[in-house]
Image: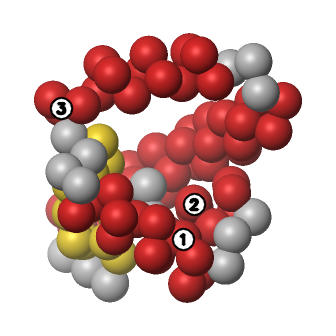
Amino acid sequence: MCISDLELILDFTQTKTSRHLIYLKNSGILNTRKQDQWVFYHLKDEVYDIINQIFQFLQKDQVLRGDLEAYKTMYSNRELALNKLQTRNWQS
């Protein structure tokens, strides 16, 4: 996901979101990929299982469940946008 997606999901400012992403990246949890002007963040493969277990535990929190629903909607829309972007790059 890119930072603007995370801002919308978490209802954080850009500064706060960036700061937390830097913490996660510096701790070895996230990787980044740059595409055009966007930087996309994703979990490293080696931490995916433990993060999944943490999220299963946190499912009991109502605010986090709402964030997860927002994420699912944003992720679905992101996949559509990414496919459109890749199609545009192939045609260039």
Badge 3 marks a residue whose secondary structure is helix
Which-is-in-front pick, marks 1 and 2?
1
Of pointers 1 and 3, the one earlier in the residue sequence? 1
Q: Residues within 10 Å of mark 1 (few under 14, many from 20)?
A: some
Does any portion of residue 51 appear in the rendered image? yes
Pointer 1 with pointer 2, Cβ within 8 A: yes
In the picture shown, does residue 60 fall above or below 87? Answer: above
x then y, percent, for residue 38: 35, 76
Residue found 69% across the figure and 57% down from its top: 10
Q: Which residue is mark 3?
A: 45
Q: In x, y percent, where is residue 11? A: 75, 64
Q: Earlier in the sequence, mark 3 or mark 2?
A: 2
Amino acid at dot 1: Thr
**Residue located beneath label 2 in the image:** 6
* Callouts 3 and 2 close, C-beta under 8 Å: no
Front residue (pair 92, 76): 76
Q: Residue tagged by mark 1?
A: 17
Whole-number angstrom distance, CA of label 1 to CA of label 2: 7 Å
Name the residue: 75% across, 18% down.
60
> Percent x, y for residue 91?
22, 67
Q: Position of residue 46 (x, y in %)?
A: 15, 29
Please name whichever residue, 55 or 32, is drawn nearer the observer in this view of the structure: 55
In the rendered image, the quadrant that contains the N terminus is bottom left
Report whether 48 appears left or right of 76.
left
Earlier in the chain: of badge 1 and badge 2, it is: 2
